[in-house]
Amino acid sequence: MQLLKMELRGFKSFADKTTLIFDKGITAIVGPNGSGKSNISDAVRWVMGEQNVRQLRGQKSEDIIFAGTEKRRPQGAAEVSLYFDNSDHSLEIDFSEVVVTRRLFRSGESEFYINKRNCRLKDIHMLFADTGIGQDSMAVIGQNRVDRILNSRPEERRIIFEEVAGISRYKGRKEEGLRK
Ligand code: ATP
Ligand code: MG
């Protein structure tokens, strides 16, 4: 399943509507420090349901809304849409393209949409369950997460590999069994 396109408006440093189009293959986003590269990956995790604003490098949920600059007034809301190619119907929904949208107003009011239809966060979780691109998946790996893996001790690193390989739950069950 491919991410085709992304639209941001009022999300962090993206005050105006910004459209990113992803071609097949690998896309690299380059730019100076502070230009908004990480904000793009934050936006992906936010739409997929990230509820902990600290994971998006903020203190309170309002921090993800464009805060204004000397020249620009703040935005009243943040909105991000992700467009997925679903021509192989790996998402169980009768559309060949799926658009997931999240919107947050300064009032704290939050909205989710699947193909422009209002939905619950739970509906997004359910739609993307077992696709590997849900909220807690390894689909988006943050900068500090890479550092953590590189700097970890072998025992810690083993835990990460076991999780990725999907054997940690079996190990957990084995340990539970031995204790009995
Ligand atoms: P680096 O190369 O250092 O990792 P980066 O390209 O990943 O940089 P980001 O961390 O994505 O940069 O962007 C940080 C910028 O986003 C900062 O300039 C910060 O002021 C701006 N920013 C973050 N939140 C907001 C907000 N709510 N309103 C306006 N600007 C914001
Ligand atoms: Mg960055």
Image (tube, rainbow, N blue to C red):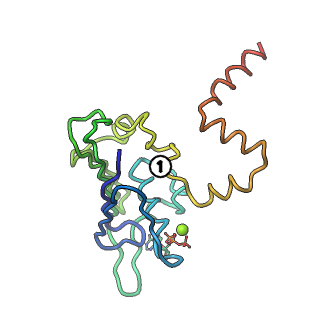
The answer to whether residue 10 is above or below residue 89 is below
**Based on the displayed image, in which of its 4 quarters is residue 171 positioned?**
top right
Q: Secondary structure at mark 1?
A: loop
Q: Can you give x and y, in whole percent of width and height, for residue 121 in the image?
A: 37, 42
Question: Could you tell me which residue is drawn at 46 percent across and 59 percent down?
Answer: 41
Q: Which kind of residue does numbered mark 1 sit on? A: Gln
**Based on the displayed image, in which of its 4 quarters is residue 148 positioned?**
bottom right
- Residue lying at the far top in this picture: please name it: 180
Q: With 166 as the anchor, is 140 left or right in this view?
A: left
Q: Which residue is mark 1?
A: 51
Q: Which residue is at the front of the view, 125 or 22?
A: 22
- On the rendering, which quadrant does ligand 2 occupy? bottom right
Question: Could you tell me which residue is drawn at 67 percent across and 59 percent down?
Answer: 147
**Based on the displayed image, in which of its 4 quarters is residue 175 positioned?**
top right
Q: With 129 as the anchor, is 152 left or right in this view?
A: right
Q: Which residue is at the front of the view, 32 or 102?
A: 32
